[in-house]
Amino acid sequence: KQEVTQIPAALSVPEGENLVLNCSFTDSAIYNLQWFRQDPGKGLTSLLLIQSSQREQTSGRLNASLDKSSGRSTLYIAASQPGDSATYLCAVSLDSGYSTLTFGKGTMLLVSP
Amino acid sequence: DGGITQSPKYLFRKEGQNVTLSCEQNLNHDAMYWYRQDPGQGLRLIYYSQIVNDFQKGDIAEGYSVSREKKESFPLTVTSAQKNPTAFYLCASSPLWTGEITNEKLFFGSGTQLSVL
């Protein structure tokens, strides 16, 4: 059974720091990997989606990389801001329909001014 | 604006009572999903549907039921058989895969917090 682990569970940094969130998965036969953001008491917002054939995706200050063979992905946040404070979840899918989507428990990020 | 609407935002259930959570989307997505989120845990799939009048059980379907009579709507009923219903429930939708590598992201509603009285 696919298992997704996110390290660290919580992270507190001062504003302006570059930071890396880690995600690992046990079954490398994934279809895609997605990074989400969740604000307290809210739903999830998809940040970046990486197909299994891709190595990385970028959106603004966010960069996600995928090393499928080693079962790892990283989310890089450049020049962090207080507005980046949220929980970041990683999820992998074994097929195109999301019915096999497996989520990690998330990394809770706090960026202080 | 296109999106997913979940209601109510907060819901309380008495023992032995069935309650229904609403999920409506106007994104013209074929696939819809219900997830349960417990504090400090990842999301777990309850039910999903890829077409009207058809749905499949997810990992934790016991004590829940769904219907998909319209493309836009996918309500979830938490029955009295679900002995530990307190959780944050999230509805999501996505396009079906077309065979092309497109940006087929998963879109979420804002969630319903269910608590037991």
Image: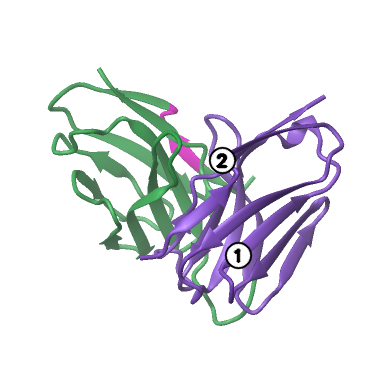
Chain colours: A purple, B green
Q: What amino acid type should be assigned to the residue bearing mark 2?
A: Ala
Q: Residue at x 43, y 41 (%)?
A: B41
- Magenta stretch bounds: B5-9
Is residue A105 or residue A69 the one in the foreground?
Answer: A69
- Which residue ends up furthest to the bottom in the rendered image? B99
Image quarter where the N terminus of chain B lies is top right
Q: Are marks 2 and 1 on the same chain?
A: yes
Q: What amino acid type should be assigned to the residue bearing mark 1?
A: Arg
Dot 2 or dot 1: first in sequence order is 2
Secondary-structure class at tag 1: strand
Q: Is residue B59 visible?
A: yes
Q: Residue at x 12, y 27 (%)?
A: B16
**Residue bearing the label numbered 1:** A72
**In the displayed structure, does residue A19 sit left or right of residue B72?**
right
- Which residue ends up furthest to the top in the rendered image? B117
Q: Quadrant of residue A16?
A: top right
Secondary-structure class at tag 2: loop
